[in-house]
Image (cartoon, helix red, strand yellow):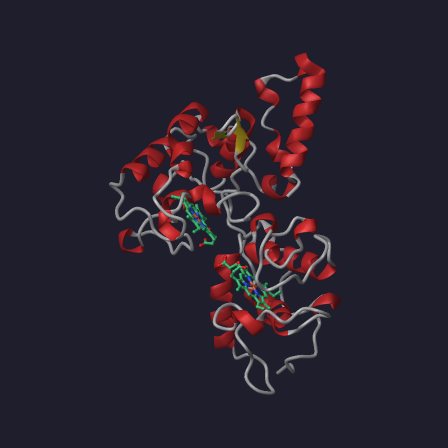
């Protein structure tokens, strides 16, 4: 969430140093420990993808207006700004003299974020291509809806062509495994327990990730699996900063979402409960031994 501030600071620094800042010292984005972890250093920055091609042909796809204000009628950017915290993390648009656009600096940051979602060694497996593609054509389930009914759609083809400009030895970013056992033992109870002044998630999200436990007993393994599956669409493995369930209940003053009809559970990004959950999203917290902040008496343990 401080990425843009960090890069702004670096730009200012660059301006001060003038000569010291060549193209090669950019991009500054990999200074984020969450994104550079596990990166293959022998591969060109941003997987060797072509930036000019990206700006000319790919970025406009994210901006394209699709006629309406909801679901597949809206533009990718309507849902995918860094503020909304869905993957892609596009920068908020700059508005100047009635024009709305991304500055080159913003485009470079978008480029770095988008590069994380592609796999030049096997373009068709790229998350960027699978999310908007219809499931009947092999695409993934996508909360934003499916925009392309087949791989022959022009947008699909342009993006695939761009991905192919990347270094073929650059693969997909390693997928962090988020542990089911820890979810069942330590995360699920968070959704069932209220805190002072805040209802439990279960009050409103019971049909989704916050499945209610059976009366007087713990969730069955089946129920935990169902909740885990449902939550998987609200988390970005390895990246707490683009994980929606950590973002929605965080207060906007602390960098959370501007709107959540369910109120706020965390008033600081460093809330201990939230940090413990972030460590799980990063793949670090595993097993059934819960840290103190994630120990609840309800529901009763098996
Ligand atoms: C109505 C809101 C909305 C729109 C419009 C939308 N998305 Fe999404 N998208 C989301 C949300 C929410 C997620 C995270 C949950 C998920 O993966 O379904 C997501 C996830 C993604 C992901 C990551 C999938 C993964 O592997 O985790 C990609 C890539 C993506 N969207 C691309 C796009 C592109 C490209 C467009 C435009 C053609 C677009 N989205 C339009 C809401 C939207
Ligand atoms: C009082 C009801 C209520 C409570 C309690 C509540 N929410 Fe929500 N939540 C909503 C509503 C309504 C929406 C959809 C509109 C919006 O985004 O605010 C939503 C949206 C969300 C989304 C976005 C879903 C998507 O598909 O992108 C997430 C994530 C979320 N809530 C997480 C939580 C978590 C985690 C908790 C508990 C800490 C929680 N909510 C508690 C009502 C609630």
**15 left or right, relative to 53:** right
Residue at 39% across / 49% down in the picture? 131
Residue at x 61%, y 87% (from the top left corner): 216
Q: Residue furthest top?
A: 19
Q: Is residue 168 visible?
A: no
Q: Is residue 109 visible?
A: yes
Q: Is residue 289 left or right of residue 24?
A: right
For residue 259, above or below residue 127? below
Q: Quadrant of residue 273?
A: bottom right
User: Where is ligand 2, by quadrant?
Assistant: bottom right
- Residue 289 in picture, x, y percent from top left: 68, 69
Compared with 121, 56 (above or below) is above
Q: Locate residue 80, reporting x and y percent.
A: 49, 45
Instruction: Find residue 91 and report its image quarter.
Output: top right
The front one of 83 and 212 is: 83
How many marks are shown on the rendered structure?
A: 0
In this view, the residue farthest toward the bottom is 216
Decide: is 274 above or below 149: below
* 145 lies left or right of 270: left
* Quarter of the rendering occupied by the N terminus: top right
Residue 120 versus residue 195: which sits nearer the camera? 195
Q: Residue at x 55, y 77 (%)?
A: 212
Q: Identify which residue, 79 or 100, lies in the foreground.
A: 100
Q: Picture coordinates of residue 55 (x, y %)? A: 43, 27
Position in image of residue 145 (x %, y %) = 37, 53
Along the horizontal axis of the image, is 99 left or right of 202?
Answer: left
**Location of the C terminus (image quadrant):** bottom right
**Residue positioned 60% across, 48% down in the render:** 241
């Amino acid at each position: 969430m401080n990425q843009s501030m960090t890069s702004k600071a670096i730009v200012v620094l660059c301006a001060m140093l003038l000569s010291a800042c060549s193209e090669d010292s950019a991009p500054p984005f990999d200074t984020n420990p969450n994104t550079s972890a596990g990166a293959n250093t022998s591969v060109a920055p941003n997987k060797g993808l072509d930036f000019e091609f990206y700006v000319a042909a790919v970025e406009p796809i994210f901006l394209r207006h699709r006629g309406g204000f909801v679901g597949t009628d809206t533009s990718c950017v309507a849902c995918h700004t860094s503020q909304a915290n869905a993957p892609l993390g596009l920068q908020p648009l700059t508005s100047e003299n009635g024009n709305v656009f991304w500055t080159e600096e913003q485009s470079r940051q978008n480029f770095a974020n988008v590069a994380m979602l592609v796999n030049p060694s096997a373009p068709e497996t790229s998350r960027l291509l699978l999310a908007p593609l219809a499931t009947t054509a092999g695409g993934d389930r996508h909360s934003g809806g499916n925009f392309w009914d087949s791989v022959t759609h022009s947008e699909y083809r342009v993006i695939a062509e761009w991905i192919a400009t990347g270094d073929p030895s650059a693969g997909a970013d390693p997928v962090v495994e988020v542990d089911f056992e820890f979810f069942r033992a330590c995360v699920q109870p968070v959704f069932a327990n209220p805190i002072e002044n805040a209802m439990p998630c279960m009050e409103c999200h019971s049909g989704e990730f916050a499945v209610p436990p059976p009366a007087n007993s713990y969730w069955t393994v089946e129920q935990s699996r169902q909740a885990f599956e449902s939550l998987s669409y609200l988390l970005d493995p390895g990246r707490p900063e683009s994980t929606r369930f950590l973002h929605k209940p965080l207060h906007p003053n602390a960098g959370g979402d501007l709107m959540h009809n369910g109120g706020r559970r965390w008033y600081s990004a460093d809330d201990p409960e939230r940090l413990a959950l972030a460590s799980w999203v990063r793949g670090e917290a595993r097993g059934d031994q819960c840290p103190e902040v994630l120990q609840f008496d309800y529901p009763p343990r098996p």
